[in-house]
Image (cartoon, rainbow, N blue to C red):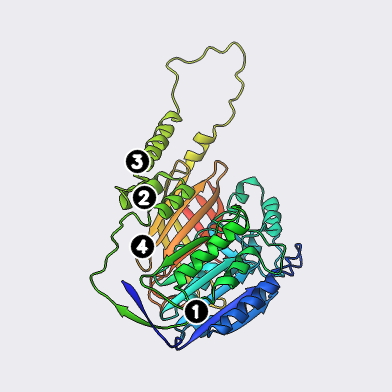
């Protein structure tokens, strides 16, 4: 367990990347991100951070800024990434939107910056990592993409940003709750950035500072905007003090249900029997255990109720029978069985990679496992198959050895991505939504 002791001097090396994107070319401009970025950068410089500020960055600018930040974070003690501007979630993955983004279809999602890759960059810092997303504004680009995709596929686009599982030693601060919209503000800064600037230089413990920021935003917006905060470290941290890390053996988490709430929200978002069963296994004696049992029983009963029943006697037809409308329940079950999934990612700016796994489709739900769930190198594949064969799969994984990982993430770094495509008969094709990777499926 990590413990932090504070000394009077500043940390040896502190780095920060602050980005404010407001001058969008294909959407109404946001008035405050430019001011937010400049003001936050100035504040962090006063606290001893080697700070780089980026304003109204296009795709190339975002890529270069994050690459430079990744290199700087490797040798830092404390690293901060602060973003003000448009963001969105697609297939469970959060993206930051550059000012030249134009979202015509799913392929354009690749033009945006993945937040989970920034989390991986932050994890390279030795002592403390901070991610601040003042980015949940109402996003017309996301709405444009929804309209172009149609109702079924657009279900993979949700409001705001998704909650991120916080790695050890990290603070993740959101301007508002997951899936909610934040206020851009009528003054020089957004409500969240204004509160951040008010408190960040106070000589207080960092957890206290971020809680005060949340309280101020909630009060200023009269309860309409409630920031979320994830603190994944033990001890006290002061930005104006030197951090010395000491490992203290024998300290354990006394609350086995501490993570139950966040896991339950994830289980509800997935909405499959296996997701609720997984929650029950992990948290059998916590607050949502009985509700998980109820959901599992209800879903299993629904599966029984929709099973086709053969009539005891054939109907007497006095005229040519009218063909019955196709049953979506019967239709989707034609995909039930074991499927081989092969994913191939060609070399681009990172080395290429490929793998194969076997997943199972049952009553419109797909589940597959590569490696061991929750362990380095493991990936969990869960998704849905529509009656017409349309498929979307959400993937949660954990990076393997840093040397063999294409992105050189620290071992065990959690990541997410989505796969979208279609099954037809005993075969299927799909793509990874954020990269140029092809996916082929074949029924065994």
Q: Quadrant of residue 311?
A: top left
Q: What number is the disc on residue 279?
A: 2
Residue at the spot x=38%, y=64% of the render?
378
Residue 433, disc: none
User: Which numbered mark, 3 or 2, is in the foreground of this view?
Assistant: 3
Please identify the quarter of the rendering in which residue 7 is found.
bottom left
Q: Nearer the viewer, mark 1 or mark 2?
A: 1
- Judged from the image, the secondary structure of the residue bearing numbered disc 2 is helix
Q: Any mark on residue 290, and which?
A: 3
What's the CA distance linking mark 3 and mark 2?
A: 11 Å
Earlier sequence position, callout 3 versus callout 1: 1
Q: Secondary structure at mark 1?
A: strand
- Viewport quadrant of the N terminus: bottom left
Q: Are marks 3 and 1 in contact (CB under 8 Å)?
A: no
What is the C-alpha distance between the residues marked 3 and 1? 41 Å
Please give the label number shown on residue 374: 4
Question: Label 1 belongs to which residue?
Answer: 79
Q: Residues within 10 Å of mark 3 (few under 14, many from 20)?
A: few
Q: Is residue 406 visible?
A: no
Percent of width and height locating residue 74? 46, 84
Contact flag, marks 4 and 3 (Cβ < 8 Å): no
Q: Tell me the distance, in whole angstroms, between the alpha carbons under discs 4 and 1.
A: 26 Å
Rendering coords of residue 80 (x, y %): 52, 76
State the image coordinates of residue 6 (x, y, percent, origin top left): 38, 81
- Front in this rendered view, residue 116 or 207: 207
For label 4, the SS is loop
Among numbered discs 1 and 2, the one appearing first in the sequence: 1
């Amino acid at each position: 367990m990590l413990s932090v002791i504070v000394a009077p001097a500043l940390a040896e090396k502190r780095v920060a990347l602050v980005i404010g994107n407001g001058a969008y070319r294909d959407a109404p401009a946001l008035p405050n991100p430019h001011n937010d970025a400049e003001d936050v950068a100035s504040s962090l410089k006063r606290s001893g951070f080697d700070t780089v500020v980026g304003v109204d960055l296009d795709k190339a600018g975002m890529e270069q800024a994050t690459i430079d930040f990744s290199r700087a974070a490797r040798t830092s003690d404390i690293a901060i990434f602060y973003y003000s501007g448009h963001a969105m979630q697609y297939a469970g993955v959060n993206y930051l939107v550059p000012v030249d983004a134009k979202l015509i279809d799913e392929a354009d999602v690749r033009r945006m910056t993945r937040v989970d890759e920034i989390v991986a960059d932050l994890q390279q810092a030795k002592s403390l990592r901070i991610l601040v997303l003042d980015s949940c504004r109402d996003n017309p680009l996301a709405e444009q993409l929804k309209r172009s995709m149609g109702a079924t596929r657009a279900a993979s686009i949700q409001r705001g940003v998704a909650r991120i599982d916080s790695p050890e030693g990290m603070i993740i601060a959101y301007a508002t709750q997951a899936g909610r919209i934040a206020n851009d503000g009528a003054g020089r800064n957004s409500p969240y950035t204004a509160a951040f600037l008010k408190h960040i230089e106070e000589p207080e413990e960092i957890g206290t500072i971020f809680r005060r920021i949340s309280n101020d935003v909630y009060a200023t917006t009269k309860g309409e905007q409630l920031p979320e905060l994830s603190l994944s470290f033990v001890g006290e941290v002061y930005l104006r003090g030197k951090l010395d890390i000491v490992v203290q053996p024998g300290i354990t988490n006394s609350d086995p249900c501490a993570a139950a709430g966040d896991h339950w929200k994830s289980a509800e978002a997935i909405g499959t029997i296996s997701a609720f069963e997984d929650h029950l296994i992990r948290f059998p004696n916590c607050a949502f255990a009985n509700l998980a049992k109820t959901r599992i029983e209800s879903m299993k009963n629904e599966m029984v109720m929709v099973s086709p029943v053969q009539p005891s006697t054939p109907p007497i037809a006095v005229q040519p029978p009218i063909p019955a409308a196709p049953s979506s329940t019967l239709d989707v079950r034609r995909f039930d069985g074991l499927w081989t999934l092969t994913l191939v990612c060609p070399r681009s700016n990172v080395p290429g990679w490929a793998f194969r796994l076997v997943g199972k489709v049952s009553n419109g739900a797909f589940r597959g496992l590569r490696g061991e769930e929750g362990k380095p190198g493991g990936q969990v594949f869960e998704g849905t198959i529509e009656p017409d064969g349309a498929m979307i799969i959400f993937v949660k994984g954990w990076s393997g050895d840093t040397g063999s990982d294409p992105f050189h993430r620290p071992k065990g770094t959690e990541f997410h991505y989505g796969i979208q495509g279609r099954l037809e008969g005993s075969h299927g094709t799909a793509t990874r939504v954020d990269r140029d990777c092809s996916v082929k499926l074949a029924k065994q």
